[in-house]
Amino acid sequence: MRPRRSVLYMPGANERALEKAKSIDADALILDLEDSVAPDAKEQGRENVVAAVRSGEYGHRELAIRVNSIGTEWHDADVKAASQAGPDAILVPKVESAEQVLALVAALEKHGAPEHTQLWAMIETPRALLHAEEIAAAHERLTVVVMGTNDIVNETYGLHVPGRNATVLTSLAWTLLAVRAAGKVVIDGVYNAVKDPEGFEAEARQGREMGFDGKTLIHPSQVEPANVAFAPSADDVERAQGLIDTFEEAKAAGQGVVTFNGKMVEELHVRDARRILAFHEALQGR
Ligand SMILES: CC(C)(COP(=O)(O)OP(=O)(O)OC[C@H]1O[C@@H](n2cnc3c(N)ncnc32)[C@H](O)[C@@H]1OP(=O)(O)O)[C@@H](O)C(=O)NCCC(=O)NCCSC(=O)C[C@H](O)C(=O)O
Ligand SMILES: [Mg+2]
């Protein structure tokens, strides 16, 4: 029930953004060392994100460090520094197999990552998509999968289009199934047009309808609409409570199926309604 509606990336080399993030109402922050940090700034970025994690100044926000991908010259030092800093999670881009997940878990252990530091993995290459099920289920320390839709478009030679192209939608749905089969959390990719709030809202809504837990973001202006899109609305909460009450009444009278607001309701719908209420309560309690 930990909310991950809004998961905001920021470049690890951008000290202004790291400072600003302390007052942004995102559920989680990804302090990036990969794509948003130029090669010459990688070491400075690493120092900055370690200091940010150690500062303890990010309140309720879950903190993840995104390291450079396996096989790059920065990966090992990033994993070591991140493990020693002990954020809530270490996010590894371009993970492609269960073996890599197991090797990453071993690296976290070797470098003394505290128990609370989870492993998050990005699925963003064709090879990763073909191994999504084994990656998601590879180890219990891997708790969250993050979609890399820019890399998927890039690697498949596709185009960014409104509503997302068929390959991206297939990749999203496929990974979502794999991650849900493993009982874990899955976060949608980013929306690049930072000055297009309508487009963002539509894409966030699409991700919510598909079943994602939240969306990765690149700009503070995307946080509030993501928090709204991935939280139950007041109507959702009222409907969930009404559905439960109606079903419980019918159940007491010996019925296993009823209608509520003109629609069939069975025990499985009650489970979903209870999940909505529990998530709402978790948000209220924050
Ligand atoms: C996209 C940006 C480069 C835009 O930057 P800019 O033009 O400077 O934005 P603004 O002037 O509107 O900024 C206003 C203030 O907000 C702060 N800011 C901006 N972005 C962030 C952020 N992400 N986190 C925290 N704070 C932020 C600015 O500093 C301004 O503050 P102030 O001066 O005090 O008013 C920029 O938004 C940006 O760098 N975004 C993040 C880019 C990033 O991290 N990219 C990597 C992740 S995306 C990815 O790799 C996806 C995946 O792998 C895939 O394959 O899809
Ligand atoms: Mg990527």
Image: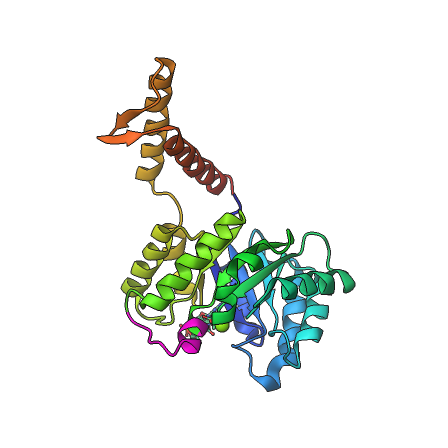
Residue occupying the point 61% across, 71% down: 67
Q: Nearer the viewer, residue 17 or 66?
A: 66
* Residue 134 visible to the viewer: yes
Residue at the limit of the structure toward the bottom, as seen here = 40
Which residues make up the magenta segment? 151-161
Residue at the limit of the structure toward the left, as seen here = 262
Does 154 lie within the magenta span? yes
Number of numbered discs on residues: 0
Does 264 sit above or below residue 285?
A: above
Residue 50's x, y, as percent?
Answer: 67, 68
Does 266 sit above or below residue 189?
A: above
When asked about the image quadrant of residue 109, the answer is: bottom right
Residue 30's x, y, as percent?
Answer: 55, 64
Does 243 lie within the magenta span? no
When asked about the image quadrant of residue 260, the answer is: top left
Does 82 sit above or below residue 35?
A: above
Residue 1's x, y, as percent?
Answer: 52, 43
Residue occupying the point 72% across, 69% down: 80
- In the rendered structure, the answer to whether residue 187 lies left or right of residue 228 reads right
